[in-house]
Amino acid sequence: MQSLIDTIKAFNAPLLPDKVQLKYSFMAENPYRFYRGTCHLYAHYLAGMKLPPSPTVWASGDLHLENFGSFLGCNSLVYFDLNDFDEAILAPAVWEITRMVSSIFIAFDTLQIEEEKANRMARLFIKTYIETLQKGKAQYMEPRIAQGIIRDFLLSAARRKPNHLLRKKTIRKKGRISLFLDTDKHQPVDKPTKKKLKAFITDWIQHHTEAVYGYKVADIVFRIAGTGSVGVRRYAVLLKGQSKTKKYLLLDMKQAKTSSLEPFTHQAQPDWPTEAERVVTIQKIMQNVSPSLLSTCEFEGDAYVLQEMQPTKDNINFSLLRDDYRGMYQVISDMALLTASSQLRCSGYLGSATIDELIAFAGRKNIQEKIWDISRECGRLSLEDYRAFREAFDRGEFAEGQLPAEQAAAA
């Protein structure tokens, strides 16, 4: 049986080696960041438990507090919704919900928010999720109907100008705008790869049906964002408009990998043309409205998800809500409503449960307590694994060049 250390190393072995070292350092920061970087461990916990039967749903696969946020939809309105679908898959509903509820326990523990408040927020999430399923109607969140902090959040995001993001991501030298390089978010791309990427994006602009026309490539850098996805190939692309207005656009081009939940599920999955098609298709059916330019492409044999980087995309900072109980209550309740709505929205699609089945699941006796118990146990296991990982990390067992024990033996 693999140890925790070997399991983590084996999972991350196919990723870019230098970026994996960065990912490990992120995971060592605190229990919540470890949780975000180890979705595969959570699926392993669930696979070893006796879970209550639950309907099969389309799931984002890695739902936690920071995988909700605002974004500009393709209809030019700002929405707050689930916003990360790298691990998206057909899975039991309880997998998605307990992943989210466990994140409340771990995030609040990391932020040193009192346990009783974490317990109340976890129960609130479960209760609102169940009640939304019972109503059988998907809801959505945009400025005209949002309340409290999320409404303020969306209104503020909607007022931001396009150059807000440009100011953060670019630098002007000798009259030329290029992407800012730093060791945290943007890193240089080697010249041969950059040349190939530039030619590829140029061709995409000219021939792809979902591309934006009238632009040319101004710059490309390697992009680092999030935690779980650190280690995949990801690029930020700056496009310059060719009209007199000289507008700029930023694209995010992210390599798509197989969902880390797939080895642990028993549900038959659709035969997707590529992993990027899986991510984009599920995102489009789970969200009420999808982001601008969301599409797929293939570059040098790898599938990528393409979408516009936006000045409005942002996440709720829970550390700022520490002493705002009413605000925290509203945010957690809205996240639960959106989670249930994402499942209702794509009910009956390619093997997912019908609305009637979801309503019946929500009406089961003691289902809320069962979700609570599973979430608490998985949260406890993740905290234990973090402590073991951090001790191994401090001992240098995740230093560059070390292989999992089984791979080292084979070598």
Image: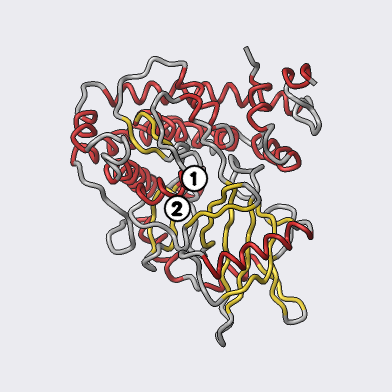
Identify the image quadrant of the C terminus.
Answer: top right
Identify the image quadrant of the N terminus.
Answer: top right
Q: Residue at x 77, y 18 (%)?
A: 410
Name the side, left or right, on which 132 lies relative to 186. Answer: left
Name the side, left or right, on which 85 lies relative to 397. Answer: left
Residue at the far top in the pictured view:
1
Seen in the picture, residue 239 relative to 323 is either above or below; the reply is below
Callout 1: SS: helix
Q: Residue at x 64, y 36 (%)?
A: 27
Examine the image and state in which quarter residue 49 appears.
top left
Question: Is residue 259 among the parts visible in the rendering?
Answer: yes
Q: Which residue is mark 1?
A: 66
Spot occupied by residue 172 in the image (x, y as percentages of width and height):
71, 75
Q: Nearer the viewer, residue 44 or 210?
A: 210
Q: Which residue is mark 2?
A: 69
Question: Is residue 326 among the parts visible in the rendering?
Answer: no
